[in-house]
Image (cartoon, rainbow, N blue to C red):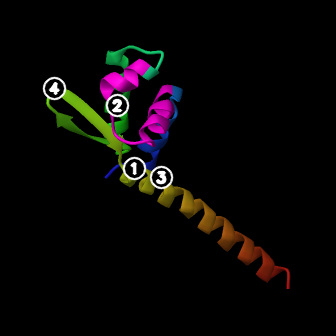
Amino acid sequence: MTTPHVVCDALGDPTRREILDRLRNGPTSVGALADALPVSRPAVSQHLKVLTTAGLVGHRQDGTRHVYHLDPAGLDTLRAWLDGFWQDALESFADFVRTQR
């Protein structure tokens, strides 16, 4: 299972965030991603490797092409981690309100 820190690290790069934004529209090949970005095809492949390791994207092979798609599991990991912060904040606020009575 991917940790939220790995997901955050993967999202820290603007090119990787752009790749995720493009994959929101549906599965896309490495070549199509590279054509739409100001980086080389090998660089896109390296970014996709990081995103795959983080659990944010998955891929399938279609002949000689690799087609990538979003994998919601990576975002679920991040969402659960952030929800923990929200829950802690709500509990802290509730404790504060109780002490003010």
Query: Mark 1 to mark 4: distance in Å?
Result: 26 Å
Q: Main secondary structure of the magenta part?
A: helix
Mark closest to the chain's N terminus, 2 or 4: 2
What residue lies at 45% left-to-right and 49% top-to-bottom?
Answer: 4
Task: Name the one closer to the observer, 29 or 3.
Answer: 29
Query: Mark 3 to mark 4: distance in Å?
Result: 32 Å
> Of the residues shown, which amino acid type is indicated by label 2?
Leu
What residue lies at 44% left-to-right and 41% top-to-bottom?
Answer: 25
> Of the residues shown, which amino acid type is indicated by label 4?
Thr
Residue 16, given in percent of the width and then of the height, sits at 46, 31
Q: Which mark is residue 33?
A: none
Q: Dot 1 lies on which element?
A: helix
Residue tagged by mark 1? 74
Residue tagged by mark 3? 78
Residue 73, given in percent of the width and then of the height, sits at 37, 54
Location of residue 73 with respect to 42 vertically, above or below = below
Residue tagged by mark 2? 48
